[in-house]
Image (tube, helix red, strand yellow):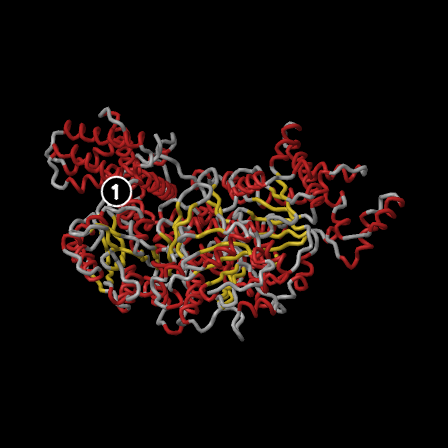
Amino acid sequence: MSEYRLAEKPALDALTAMGYGALHHEAAMVMRQEANRVLLKPVLIEALQALNEELGDEDAEAIYSDLSTLSDNEEWQRRLRGAYSRRLKGEAKDRPVALINFKRPDRNRYHVVRQFKVEAQRTRIADLVVFVNGIPLVVIEAKCPLKAADRSGQAFEQIKQYERDIPRLFSPNAFNIVTDGMATLYGATGAPAKFYAPWPDPWPRTRDEFADDLTKDLWCLLEPSRLLDLLAHFIVFETDPDTGRRIKKVCRYQQFRAVNKAANRVAEGTKRKGLIWHTQGSGKSLTMVFLALKLKTHLTLDAPTLQNPNILVLTDRIDLDDQLSKTFVACGLPNPKQAASVGELREAVARGGSGQILLSTIFKFQGSKEPIPNSEDWIVLVDECHRTQEKDLGAFLQATLPNARYFGFTGTPIKKADKDTYARFSEPSETYLDKYGIDDAVRDGATVPILYEGRKTEWSINEAEIDILFDRWFVDMSDEKREKLKQKGVSLALIAKHPDRIRLIARDIWEHFKQTCRPDGFKAQVVAIDRESVVLYRLALVGAIANDLTKAGMAEADAAAKADSMIACVFSKSQEDDKPSEDLDIEAVRAELRAHYLDADGEKAAKKAFKGSGDEPSFLIVCDKLLTGFDAPNEHVMYLDKPLREHGLLQAIARTNRTCSIKRPDGSIVDKPHGRIVDYIGVTQHLDDALSSYRADDVQNALRDLDLLRRDLRKTHAEFMRLRRLLGLNGMDEKAAAYAIEKLVADGREDDWFELQRLGRHFVRTYGDLSPDPAVLDFTDDMKWAATFLRLAQQAITKDESLDHLTYSGKIRDMLEEHVRATGLTTTVRLRNITDPDFRDDFATDEKSEEELHAAFVRKAAELKRVTRELVDKNPAQYGRFSERVLEIIRRFEEGQLAAAAGLREFQDLTGGVTAEANAHDERGMDERAFAILRIIEPHAATADNGDTQSVAVGVGDLYANAQANQPSWFFMDGYKKELRREVRKLLRPLDLADSNAVRDQIEDYAIHAYAAAP
């Protein structure tokens, strides 16, 4: 009841206050007609006839039937947005069919249903489902905060289960919401938990206008006009270029805010420009897509200025033009066209007409002074707009399109003195139309913070001391050679490329990389001062890696080949590279440049491999290329040996700020905690000077000193140790402390455990983030204790597997494994599988103390919980009863109705049942999957002959096995699935089942999982 009181009921109240009608689940069931259907039929038919003039009952029924069988989420989105037509009775051609009135939200019907049950092979009950015109668009899962230390973690798991087990509910789904009554997060259909996010800003309202956060959050997402706006303009399906998969994306709050500010400005018609700063990595390209989509379709807006406008999207670089063009095309934006030449661009612009979307580079306007007619019909979106003001490019653009509307986008702040950009894109007295800065993105988890560390000061180069540094580095050179170099001019680059300096830094890079990136599969860029230093670093780094691999026992030739494959160089070619030189040093460098230069295809392949999971390459060495516009989320560290400033510095370091999760070989996931800049040249020693051109509040946290993390480690360690002492856990080993905290929780002190768990997790995570910094060494023993204790305590309290250790970095996990072995806790910590030879050891209860029996019960409860959960995922009809029995035994134990020894005996009996069921298909001479289908049919065929039921199950299994073999993607194909359903119904007919449709649907739900992969 607490979940209902603290989360579900407040959400229901908030929705009814916004105009949603609350439907009792029994009333909704009558409207659905069958428990495995999800559309509210009478509501949908009534809405169809109200929205579509002269739509008869027969046509409305046909549309309902059509939509009832539609399972493709992307096709649902298209139809909801108006891309739906069909031949109506008595008409000669197809006619558009409206499912929603976007312009008049009040003409739609809004409902919310609590405890919405959908029958399937795995029947599930959603807490709240939001309907528009009888169509379920949003699923809300509410969880009580007192039962979830990580707030909505359990709710995420249930949403995933629902999407898997009752996919019909999610076919028309726009997005999902999880809430505990205080924190509310939303995510697109099918999105992993890491992509769920809050909506903190209720623009155009303010937080003070709402009674509480839940009311504010639900208004932001579900107020009827806002929900329709999100559905109409802020959901896209993007094709992953590597896998070809379609990925659904829903906007973030800053994208919604910026797009609506710009679209409203166009609709109102009085102001004609605006400047939008959304920091790098926060989805600026998608913001431009959403804006173009809203300007193009404007389903929720009516204004003369939006009558099919022309949209021109400009960048200042060819690679960005390609990148944006691919994003627009991948998101299915209507008819985007990339202008390949100056003539083609001018022709398209001058041709006029309406509804064009053109993508090009601003250089195509070079020298253009003649205005085109009807330029007021164009809306120009300019990416990285501050760079377009250079070399009069902005003036040429303005001369060609003098009356157009201009919206400038930038991923970095605009300099204080950059009056041209403000004049071109900002209204008087306005700086940014919308701002989403560096701190905003880090706070929201859209990007990770960037930390910096300076390495040895003797390696850094201060230009003011250039002559002193020259004498220091070149002291061993002959006077004649030193004088010759001085005559050419002593430069920063000359000192930066000193062979000894590069060799020392390369060795340091490799040692740092081994500790920071390599354990978890992250990668790094090395930024060198020029092309020559790129190949010099390559030679030095190959040497450092090969030498290390040889020491580890690898053959020299193999070590050299491996080191070579771990590095790729990306730089531009020069005409001088192919010219011979009499100077042996110059010729040697040119030979290296020729050997390691990558053409367009080679560069593309290297970038793709770098973004991949293998370690070839692990490093990209660059000097100018890939410092802007290159997105590789797995780049964790940038080794900086080039003096960058201002915009160039902000652009470069942002290569490391993308969020990233890497899946390890054991299936666990590690999240990138931050980006890291390792500074060798000395930029960060004068950071304020390097960023002095910007407003201080725009860049104050662009780079954060690693010392902040050191202070955080000291602080969180002290807080954890203090609470550990107050809870009486000092002096205990990890196992004793875990059972002590279990008792505290049983006595009602759950909040103390949640706070200790929060502090402990933060302490271990901060330790891992800072390692291998020497500052962690004083905390190593306490970190090992904390991490092991958290794992054991979670297991003891929940009687379930603790997954905390799976989120730690590789190096921390290795340390903990060694600690567990050394302390003899291996048996206690590690959970075994039912097939392990020693799984049944815990069932021997004789001569065990009460403490040992308790530990054995906790371990066996966690093991069997995991085992039965995995089996239920395969087939709930077959294993559901075992899972329920495990939970029942745990409940009785926790309530004091069952002693540990008696509980272990019940677990022993249950284990025998699970083993017998797993082998039952062999006894019947059946395929395992066909036997699972038999278990689905049996409860509905109690009067049928057992042999007949088995024959039907085998026939159904063969049917799906053939589909799997002949059409591996059958489960994506609505027509094919419909045909299979028909064939299954035929096979079931001889059994004379009471509800063969329900059985058929349960079988299909199972088959979608069991027969999904290629045979």
Question: Where residue 946 sits in the image (x, y, percent)?
Answer: 14, 29
User: Which residue occupies 27% across, 57% down?
Assistant: 129
* Res. 386 image quadrant: bottom right
Helix, strand or loop at mark 1: helix
* Res. 353 image quadrant: bottom left
User: Which residue occupies 78% across, 52% down?
Assistant: 491
Question: Where residue 274 sits in the image (x, y, percent)?
Answer: 50, 68
Give whichever of 223, 829 is nearer the camera: 223
From the viewer's perspective, is 38 left or right of 784? left
Locate the N terminus and report the quarter of the image it occupies.
bottom left
From the viewer's perspective, is 189 left or right of 824? left
Give whichever of 389, 10 is nearer the camera: 389
Q: Determine which residue is flagged by label 1.
A: 885
- Residue 663 can be seen in this image: yes
Please say if 396 is above or below 667: below
Question: Where residue 26 sits in the image (x, y, percent)?
Answer: 16, 56
Give whichever of 250, 474 is nearer the camera: 250
Please say if 24 is above or below 635: below
Give whichever of 552, 630 is nearer the camera: 630
